Image: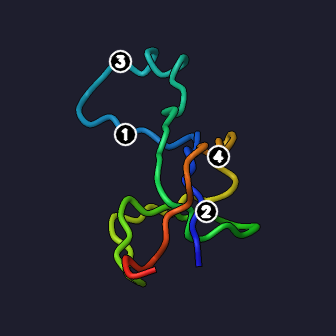
Amino acid sequence: MTYKRVTVHWLDSSTHIGWEDAKRYKDVKPCRCESTGYLVINSKSLMAISLSLSGDDINGTITIPRKCVSYVEELDVKPAMPSLSE
């Protein structure tokens, strides 16, 4: 099986700790994020990308709810093979 390399552009929540003026929050926006890796799950409800592959093992995987995804860029690189012996 091969995996596409992608960059997922998505929105995340943000957190602020400590006492602050509530008026400051009228302009608060979600965090814009970019995550790049191997697309291992691409379903109607979520996307999951992994930073590393080794055989059938994956490492450093982030799961992003589909509702948070702004857009996805497919990277123009040869897809990774899950086995080094192939």
Instruction: Work out how far the residue at label 4 is from the one at label 3, CA to CA, in angstroms.
Output: 42 Å
Q: Is residue 72 left or right of residue 79?
A: right
Residue 1's place in the image compared with 17, above or below, is below
Q: Please count the marks in the image.
A: 4
Find disc 4 in the rendering and name its residue. 74
Q: Between tags 3 and 1, which lies in front? A: 1
Residue 45's place in the image compared with 10, above or below, is below
Disc 1 residue type (three-letter): Thr
Q: Quadrant of the N terminus?
A: bottom right
Instruction: Work out how far the residue at label 3 is from the one at label 1, CA to CA, in angstroms.
Output: 15 Å
Binning the other alpha carbons within 10 Å of mark 4 as few (below 14), some (14 to 19) or many (20 upward) gives: few
Residue name at image x 55 percent, y 48 percent: 77
Find disc 2 in the rendering and name its residue. 47
Nearer to me, 85 or 70: 85
Q: Position of residue 72 (x, y in %)?
A: 66, 44
Binning the other alpha carbons within 10 Å of mark 1 as few (below 14), some (14 to 19) or many (20 upward) gives: few
Q: Is residue 17 left or right of residue 26?
A: left
Q: Earlier in the sequence, mark 4 or mark 2?
A: 2
Find residue 21 and name its label.
Answer: 3
Disc 3 residue type (three-letter): Asp
